[in-house]
Amino acid sequence: MAGDILFRARGLSKVYGSGTAAVVALRDVDLDVSAGEFVVILGPSGSGKSTLLNILGGLDTPTAGDVTFRDHVLTGASDDELTRYRREHVGFVFQFYNLIPGLTALENVQLVTDLTLNDPHGRGAEDPAAALRLVGLGDRLDFFPAQLSGGEQQRVAIARAVAKRPDVLLCDEPTGALDFETGKLVLDALRRANRDLGTSTVVITHNVGIAAMADRVLRMRSGAIVEVVVNTAPCEPAALSW
Amino acid sequence: MGMSARNGTLRWWSVLDRKAWRDVWHQRGPAVAIAIVVMVGVASFVALQSMVPHLRGAQQRYYSIARFADVWVSVSRAPDALVRRVADIPSVSAVETRVARDVILEVPKLDGPASGRVMSYPVGREITVNRLRLRQGRLMSASRADEVVISDGFASANGLSVGDSIGAALNGRWRRLHIVGVALTPEFIMEVKPGALFPDNRRYGVLWMSEEEVQGAFGLQDAWNEATLTLSAGATEAAVIRRLDTLLAPYGSLGAHGRNEQVSHRYLTDEITQAATFGTAAPVIFLGVAAFLVNLVLARLVAAQREQIGMMKAFGIGNATLVRHYASIALTPVLIGAVCGSALGLWLAGLLATLYAAYYRMPDAAFSPDWRTIVIAMAVTVLSAFVGAAAAVRRVSRLPAAEAMRPETPLRFRHGWVDRSWFLRLLSPTARLTVRGVLRRPARAGLAMLGMSLSIAVVMVGGYMFDAIAMMRDVHFTEIQREDVAVTFSHPSGRDALYELAHVSGVTRVEPLWAVPVALRHGVRERRVAISLITPDATLRRVVGADRRVVAAPRDGLLMSTALGGLLDVRAGDSVTVQVLTGRRRTVQVRVDGLVDDLIGTNAWMTGAQLRQVAGGSAVDGAALLVDPMLRDSAMAQLRRMPGVAGIGDRAAVVASFDKVMRDSFYVTLMALVGFATVLAVGVVYNTARVALSERGRELVSLRVLGFTRQEVANMLFGELAMLGVASVPVGLAIGVMLCAAMVTALSSELFRLPLTVSLRTCAWAVLVLFASGIASLWLVRRRLDRMDLVAVLKTRE
């Protein structure tokens, strides 16, 4: 599925703090992500995978190095430019779903699609109900988050992320708070969004079992990418086990 | 802060106490807001409530030292020998008699006429009722006829002191009087000219001259026209007044009265009552709002610390310790506010005491703190803090350890009737969120709205006072009194006095004034008033109601103020007994033709024909004049020199000094109330927004991650408050009007009735203050929202 290069990162470093308190989170990382690719980044906590994801998502800036998203240079962009970038191009899925409790499943998705619809630069959005059907929640449209299970809430979050047709879906431990079976349902939803909509997807996890569904697996340790494995035959989420 | 027992030793500064301090420090924004609201409440309580014992104490001490009279009576002329018979009335402990008359004064450097009351003083003898207290100089000596002692308020307003001199027309003869002393009298703690709306110390004062001089000047040798009496303890005032009235009726008595009809006493006593009323109302509002804020912030803290509470319980920290812990967190800002408020209140009380001392002429008005007030303020404040903290603290003690360690279930939004309504379906998701947020916590939303409404109401009440006074001023000085100059005669005169006035060059119109003192009776009720002349074609003095409509003269019978009708229990068509208190003192029955809903005084009116019939003769006792502006000065000079003229009122001067007093106090009062309202609005809006940020910050920051701009996210957070703010406008205006109506009831008296009129300007100020302080508060909270870490929210659960 490899196509145009979406992300190009060169010599990324990130140091938190300074002097003796300095913590190096990333050291000299190079990375390319192609359009439509499904990348899994594996690593223990503290390996720098979240930092890398945050920099790709325009939430954090590297101490050194450059990142480009297509022809946008993310390094050095202003806060407003990064907000616009996230708004137009990126979908996020969080470990703890982060839904708005006061809005139903449908409204949580609508909130984001309205944003895209009102945006003159946007490319239009999915129908919110269709997005929810895509993740298997066609019968839960009018449920509030508190009325949904954890897996269902995470799938609402995925529907919310994909409904605005982002170029890339960035997922931080999307199954971290879920049990095995539920986790597989969520991964299935991610896979479908990737296949059916062609959305590039980057998943960071410490769950090795997820790696089997990726097009490419990056392994990180101590702020560096230590191994890259290209998966020629990714398996279906239903076949995963961990 | 609590203590903890460990190994039998007490430690005053336990780890929990440290946590309490840090929690307070962490919540310092809301804590400071609570402390300020409490501070203002306590300061207003301490400042106003300590004025009550201060003023009452000063009043009582002065009354007792100066032997303030219990009963007053005026007659037309009574011989000195009659004093013995007055003193013989049972329960009368002392009597003083005097000659007292209104005079026109000429004060150096004062533009326009002034008037005063000259009173005789027995030289060489200390009087036993209403003793003078010299502030400056000495009493007059027997050898010098032109020596005068003047009242303190008049002296300081005009910059007069011993050695200066003033002119006075004693019975039409101008005299130059030398000031030898400046004195205080308990009868004029407030130097208000009878019939005036407010004290004008520059244009009205009291003068004391030797008895011999005054008696001689007014042709009352060996006679008097006023008596003042003190009564012995346990005396029945009414019985003494009845005996006096019987005794003095043949001498032209206008009827004796007690302190309750003494103007200065009434003003001061009403002021003390008002201080007590406002000193109760203001703290109730502020401490009520403080209790709400304590509840809001503490409930949020407890919810955010559920897991900590569960952990502490799991480790065996007792309920009582935890309750004490959270109560101490709530109490810390409240106590800080109360201590600062007490200090501020005492300082303000000192300031108020100085202001009162300038306004009310009393000796010995040094302010000393009333510690009982402070203790009460502290107790009430702590109580209101406990009321505020109760619900949250109860939740702490009821929380089972195991449940507490699980995260709080998200707000359980369910489908309610609103979700099914067509109305909600029309709204955007953001707007729906706002509506649901309000409906989800109706009590909190309601209280927050009430708090904002109170901010509006507080400004309205303050602005209303000025609106009401402005309307009274307009009605009184542009609808009722329309003359340039009002002249009062020393004695009722014939109509030829009017022709004389008409011949003064510059006078272009003359209308007669006449007021006949009478006692009105209806059933067992009796009231002494004056019946004034109402002339059908009058243009300078008219009868005008609160609705600004000019009342037509009755064809026959009596018109009276609705207030007087209420006092006499009289309705239109009823018949009242009128006893004339002058001349031949006739008693007649008169039908009440109608009641007039007017604003000032308890008045009665009759047409000239009717009044002549009742009074048994024709007279005028003054006139309203129009004067050609070009000839004004010469006309005034001529009027001043006319014998028989006892007073000249310059309407423009009176209005000007009235307006100046109002302007000066308007801005001070308005600024104080704007400050009060700002504290309320900021306290409520800031803390509600902070709590909302704490509850929803995480979900909102995740929207930032999803690409929402700062402004869009802030709109979602503040939408609820904006909606409540808008909703609080009509509620606040309604509460404001109700508070104003309560003030109408509380402050209206026989002297005046406040009209219930609130200007657009007042309403606009009230709304503006709420919105300005609300926006400022939201700006503070928005800065916190903007600074929230986008990365942290991805990882943390709460």
Image (tube, coloured by chain):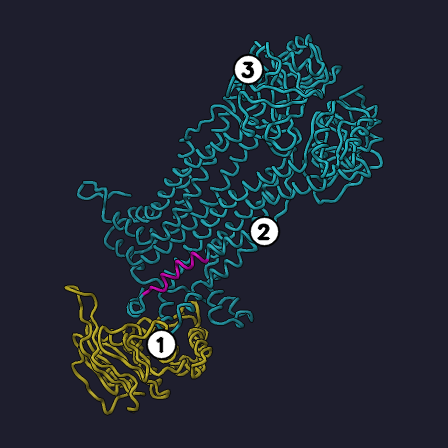
- Residue B265 x %, y %: 58, 26
Q: Depth-wise, is mark 1 or mark 3 nearer the camera?
A: 3
Q: Which chain is cyan?
A: B
Residue, disc 2: B761
The vertical placement of B118 against A101, above or below, is above
SS at mark 3?
loop
Residue B475 in the figure: left or right of residue B620: left
What residue does disc 1 label? A86
B375, B596: nearer the viewer = B596
Q: Nearer the viewer, residue A167 or B381?
A: A167
Q: Residues within 10 Å of mark 3 (few under 14, many from 20)?
A: many
Give the chain of mark 2.
B
Mark 3 — on which chain does it sit? B
Residue type pointed to by label 2: Arg
What is the number of callouts on the image? 3
- What's drawn in magenta, residue-wise? B775-788
SS state under label 1: helix
> Given the image, on which type of amino acid does mark 3 rest?
Leu
Q: Residue at x 39, y 81 (%)?
A: A136
Between B635 and B653, the one nearer to me in the picture: B635
- Give the Cα separation between the discs numbered 1 and 2: 48 Å
Chain letter, yellow in picture: A
Does label 3 lie on the same chain as label 2?
yes
**What's the distance in space between the residues labelled 2 and 3, CA to CA?**
52 Å
Question: Which amino acid does the dot numbered 1 rest on?
Answer: Arg
Residue B254 visible in the picture: yes
Q: Badge 3 is on which residue?
A: B139
- Residue at the (39%, 58%) spot, across then down: B780
Classify A215 as above or below B668: below
Residue B715, x across and y down, in percent: 44, 66
